[in-house]
Image: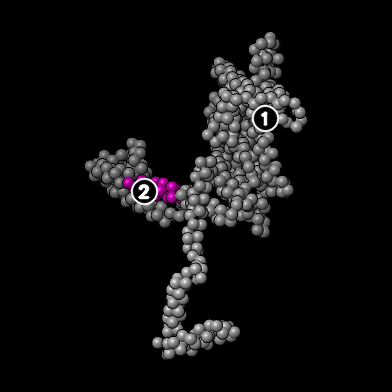
Amino acid sequence: MQHPEDGALAEVTPQGPLALVHRWLFDTRFEAGYARLVENGVAWLIIFSVMAIAAEHIEPLYGPNAAWFRAFDILTVGVFTIEYLLRVLVAPLEPEYAGRRFARVRYIFSFYALVDLVAIAPFYFSGFVAMDVEMLRALRLLRLMRIFKLSRYMVPAWKDFHAMNHGRSFRGKLYALLEPTGHSGQLHVYFDNFIMFWVVLSIVSVVLETVVSVHEVLALEFLVIDTIAFSIFTLEYLARLYAAPENPAYKKRWWPRWSHMRSGQAVIDLLAILPFLLEHFLPYPLDLRFLRVFRLMRLLKLTRYTSATVTLYKVVMREWQVIFASVFVMLLMVILTASMGYLFEHEAQPDKFENIPQSIYWAVVTLASVGYGDISPITPMGRALTVVLALLGIGIFAIPAGLLASAFTDQLRIDREAFKQKLLHAYESGDLNPRAKAMIAEETERLHLSAEDIKRLTQEAREAFHAKQREEKQFTTAVVLDPRQHPDLAAQQLRLLVSQLHLLQQAAGDENLRKQLSAQDPDNAMAVRVLNALTDCHPGGS
């Protein structure tokens, strides 16, 4: 095959091992291959390598672990080099270069190949060329350009996002980027991963700040991370507030942005940025320890990116009566056993079983089967009560856990069955229209279904749809007979109809039937003549 721009003999497409390498490692259309795994692995390696390069500038962290940093850098460069060489070798098999002359040369000078080359060039350049300290420092900084390797995933995702949202307003595009919709695409997934990365990084920094030795070394880095995280979360909060009118849940309300601000997720987003504002902009000082711990509220932002919390909320609301009953039994058991423990142990240990509230602490830790040992009975009756209480605790505390586990599994089944029903309704309208495809994509992202789950549920919906079609066809299909070809069957059908008409005549009566026929259709002479004939044959309707 020749490319229109070339006009000469095209380069022969490689066969054999190279075709297998391309198919199994780089062809995303081949479902049995490892292309997605390779893409995800390389992407995470890029992120970790950039973080390692940034950590090298922290001398107390880099100095004692220089050998490990060096080994990780060699490993990273080795993987990137293998990836670069393999992509050059299989370039003629890529759709963009297939059938074109000098496909490998064209690929080498492409944007993605140049970015891959820049990611590994500083390592090899520093290994073969003698340089001074300043040059080495500059090359170290150049290694940060590895982050541009992510453009291999971001640029196609951006193009797809732009194509899916062509003609939509800026606010609509922003909402599609922030929330899972039918036109969000892979770019929304990358955005969610970006926010989750900064949530986790900020939480780790908050935790490590409480270690005095670590805080003394990384105080500046923690401040930079907190400032960047605050900036990202603030922009996200403002963007979600601006795009709130695009949310179907708020679109018909009088003030959709105020409705969004009152929602649980918006409150969590506000709590994620509030400590930074209080710490830096209030005129009077606050307890910094409280603010640092308060920043851990950012962990709640992760609830937006998993359907597990929504499912758990549905489970609790559906089973709240049973859960309330089990909690009531637990409270009743705690109070009763605490009272009995106080009765048996107060005289023997007045300092530990001083009152019933203090005995409640002992009852709870005993029912929970933890028994810290700081409070334990010494009287025979108290110890016997402890044995009974410990055995009862195994079953009592297992009731709510078992209820939640079974209800959680049942709710997942209900959600997936509901999704399958939506697929079935979509297939009933014929070919999937854009609206149906958008609904399927939105539900897929909301339920976080894997490709295998989607394939299985789609197959089940198709089979249910075809079974329904066959059933309807079976009930609606009638055998059409030609009376001239089958006069005997026609005569039998006529006798059956006359018999049914006679039964109607007997049940309703002649006069009632004539009145109804005249009232409904005065010109229906045929029905009246048939009725008269039946009356003549069967006088009196008998």
Q: Which residue is drawn at 63% across and 54% down?
A: 248
Circle 2 — which element?
helix
Q: Residue at x 68, y 45 (%)?
A: 164
Real-space CA distance between mark 1 and mark 2, rounded to the nearest whole angstrom: 63 Å
Query: Given the image, on which type of amino acid does mark 1 rest?
Result: Ala
Q: Is residue 398 magenta?
A: yes
Depth check, mark 1 against mark 2: the one in front is 1
Query: Given the image, on which type of amino acid does mark 2 rest?
Result: Ile
From this view, report whether residue 94 is shown above or below residue 541. Answer: above
Place residue 1 in its image quadrant. Answer: top right
- Magenta span: helix, strand or loop, mainly? helix
Where does residue 421 sit, x and y in percent of width and height? Answer: 51, 54
Residue closest to the far top: 130
Viewer-proximal residue, 338 or 433?
433
Residues rendered magenta in the picture: 395-411
145 displayed left or right of 514: right
Residue denoted by label 2: 399
Q: Can residue 340 be seen in this view?
A: yes
- What is the image's colouring? one colour
300 displayed left or right of 176: left
Where does residue 20 sit, x and y in percent of width and height? Answer: 56, 27
Q: Which residue is drawn at 46% across and 85% down?
A: 534
Residue denoted by label 1: 98
Q: Can residue 54 be seen in this view?
A: no
